[in-house]
Structure formats: C-alpha cells, structure tokens
Image (tube, grey):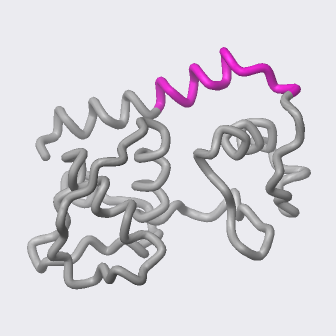
Amino acid sequence: MNGKKIKYVASLIILVTMLVGIIVPSGIAAPSTVLNDISDHWAKDKIRQMVNKGIVSGYGDGTFKPDNNITRAEFMALVNRSFGFNKKAATNFTDVQRTDWFYDEVVKAIAAGYISGYPDGTVKAQQGNKPSRGCRGTL
C-alpha cells in the first residue's frame, strides 16, 4: 500500500471519529458493556459512544485500558468495524492462526487492501508500540 493510500485511510478514520463526536449526542444511554477503568478518563464519553456503536468493546476483564497503545490487531478491528469491512481474503502470515481472536480482522484487512505485512511473512498483529514511519508504510 502506498503512502497516499495510507494517508487517505488514516484521514477517513479521523474524519469518521470527528463526525461521530459531532453527530452523536453525548447523552447516549449507558453501554451494555461495563468498562470499570474509564469513569475518570477524559475520553469516557467518546469511548462509550464507540462501545454503543459496536466499534470497540474493551477486554474480557471489564477494562478498556484507554491509555495503552493500540495493537495492530486492535487497529484493524477498529478500521474494519468503522468502515463495515466484512469481505475476507486468505492469509499466509506465519504469526496469524485461525484460533487467534484477531484472525478475522486480519483477513478482512487484507481483503480491504490496507494491510500487507512485513517482508518476513508476519503481520505482528499483537505489536502494541507506537508505529514508526516504516511501520505505517507496512501496515
């Protein structure tokens, strides 16, 4: 994926996030998912909106971990859900197994055309550090 396409996808994600904040009122009913670590967080209203829309869900232990870096797999899930990407493609990534929670997210990202992985045949879906410029080009 070339740099222009990455910038386009990133711009769309930012635009959708901003539009959600403008269009959706902040007084939405409480999410069915209880996240016990966002009550004092500056982004709690936006997080609840995204939960209500089914875009994010948090972790199985009832946390959202809003200050953690997002993993590549979580980013793919966010993009796929935000844009409604459901078509799936085959994957040959050596670090993605059918039993991984993120398997469907990776194959949807491949089908959508915004992920290509690394030259060593991996996608590093669990990587959670801030992406470098090179990483952004690889994603």
| Placement of 10 over or under 96, stated as above or below | above
Q: Please indicate, yes or no, whether residue 72 appears anywhere in the rendered image.
A: yes
Residue 106 image offset from top left, x and y in percent: 32, 63
- Residue 18 or 35: which is nearer the viewer? 35
**Magenta stretch encompasses residue 24:** yes
Q: How many marks?
A: 0
- Residue 43 or 87: which is nearer the viewer? 87
Residue 93 falls in image quadrant: bottom left
Left or right of 20? Residue 77 is left
| Residue furthest out toward the top | 23
Q: Main secondary structure of the magenta part?
A: helix
| Placement of 3 over or under 88, stated as above or below | above
Left or right of 29? Residue 69 is left
| Placement of 14 over or under 19, stated as above or below | below
Residue 20 image offset from top left, x and y in percent: 62, 25
Which residue: 58% across, 45% down? Answer: 55
Residue 7 image offset from top left, x and y in percent: 27, 34
Residue 92 falls in image quadrant: bottom left
**Magenta stretch encompasses residue 28:** no
| Placement of 113 over or under 128, stated as above or below | above
Which residue: 87% across, 63% down? Answer: 36
Left or right of 59? Residue 139 is left
Which quadrant of the figure contains the C terminus? bottom left
Which residue: 52% across, 60% down? Answer: 70
Which residue: 72% across, 61% down? Answer: 64
Left or right of 60? Residue 5 is left
Q: Please indicate, yes or no, whether residue 139 appears anywhere in the rendered image.
A: no
Q: Which residues are magenta?
A: 14-27
